[in-house]
Image (cartoon, grey):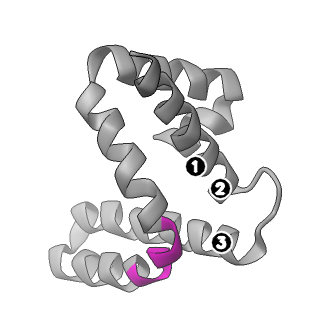
Amino acid sequence: MILAAHASSPATAQALLHELHASQPMVLQRITKSVPSMLPKAYRWIAEMEEIADFVGGAEGDTYRGLARLYERIEKSVEDKQPGGDVEVLEDFVKDAKVLIDKS
């Protein structure tokens, strides 16, 4: 959700941040805790999502295959450490979320 919003535009990601803060504060709080610890472990989720996809099968399994591709992207971003990459986008979102939460 964060990466898709940012891909649309950084302003869309900021709008998502503010909407989550206003309507889903517990989800935003969870993001600030779960995303940073997920980043270095993204590689582990690839095989897990593939296994679930194989178990579920069919069109429903495609959801998990899509998640596996997402974790592959994040893993590559962790390795590459490219400016503006997925990891930087996620870290910046978390940083901005913490600032917004602390202001409330």
Q: Secondary structure at mark 3?
A: helix
Residue 15, can we see it?
yes
What amino acid type is highlighted by mark number 3? Val
Residue depicted at x 36% and y 56%? 34
Give the labeled residue for mark 2.
Answer: 86
Residue stretch rendered in magenta on the structure: 39-44
Q: Quadrant of residue 104?
A: top left
Queried whether the magenta region covers residue 40, the answer comes back as yes
Q: Amino acid at mark 1?
A: Leu
Q: Is residue 65 left or right of residue 2?
A: left
Q: Which mark is residue 44?
A: none
Q: CA distance from mark 2 to mark 1?
A: 6 Å
Amino acid type of the residue tagged 2 in the rendering = Asp
| In this rendering, position of residue 23 left or right of residue 42 | left
Q: Residue 78: which numbered mark, if any?
A: 3
Q: CA distance from mark 3 to mark 1?
A: 11 Å
Residue 30: image x %, image y %?
A: 30, 44
- The location of residue 56, given as percent across then percent down, is 16, 73
Of badges 2 and 1, the one in the foreground is 1
Quarter location, residue 75: bottom right
Q: Residue at x 27, y 68 (%)?
A: 61
Asked if disc 2 and disc 1 are in contact, CB closer than 8 Å, the reply is yes
Residue neighbourhood size for the residue with mark 3, other residues' Cα within 10 Å, grouped as few (<14), some (14–19), many (≥20) = some
Residue beneath disc 1? 90
